[in-house]
Image (cartoon, rainbow, N blue to C red):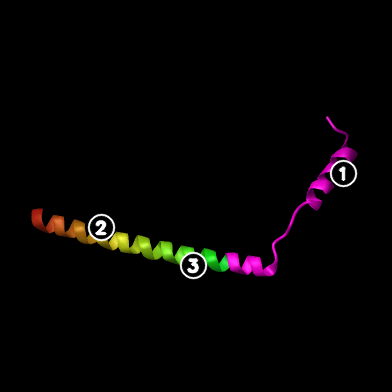
Amino acid sequence: MANPFQFIQQTRAEIAKIVWPTRREVMLTTVMVFIMATLTAIFFALVDLGIRGGLRGVLSIFG
């Protein structure tokens, strides 16, 4: 097991390797997440409407 001083040095060396995203990259990624979430919500709403319509049709025949 390494001593605490060596652990702190290694930790600082690893932290120095971190590359933070730019503001533009963060904004672009955020916009893409919102777009994908919206498209996914629309897709599942359409699937829900289709299943609901089909189920109502089946139940009206047998009900």
Residue wearing tag 1: 9
Residue 17 place in picture, x, y as percent: 78, 51
Mark 2 and 1 residues: CB-CB less than 8 Å, in contact? no
Distance from Cα at disc 3 to Cα at disc 2: 24 Å
Asked whether 61 or 23 is in front, the reply is 23
Report the amino acid beneath label 3. Answer: Ile
Asked whether 25 or 49 is in front, the reply is 25
Numbered label attached to residue 35: 3
Numbered label attached to residue 51: 2
Q: Is residue 3 visible?
A: yes
Report the amino acid beneath label 2. Answer: Ile
Residue extending farthest to the right is 5
- Quarter of the rendering containing residue 8: top right
Q: Report the span colored magenta.
A: 1-29
* Dot 1 crowding, Cα within 10 Å, few <14, some 14–19, many 20+: few
Residue at 14% x, 55% y is 58
Is residue 24 left or right of 50 when viewed as pictured?
right
Q: Quadrant of the C terminus?
A: bottom left
* Dot 3 crowding, Cα within 10 Å, few <14, some 14–19, many 20+: few
Q: Is residue 39 above or below residue 1?
A: below
Residue at 31% x, 63% y is 46
Residue at 84% x, 39% y is 7
Q: Is residue 63 visible?
A: no
* First reached walking from the N terminus: tag 3 or tag 1: 1
* First reached walking from the N terminus: tag 3 or tag 2: 3
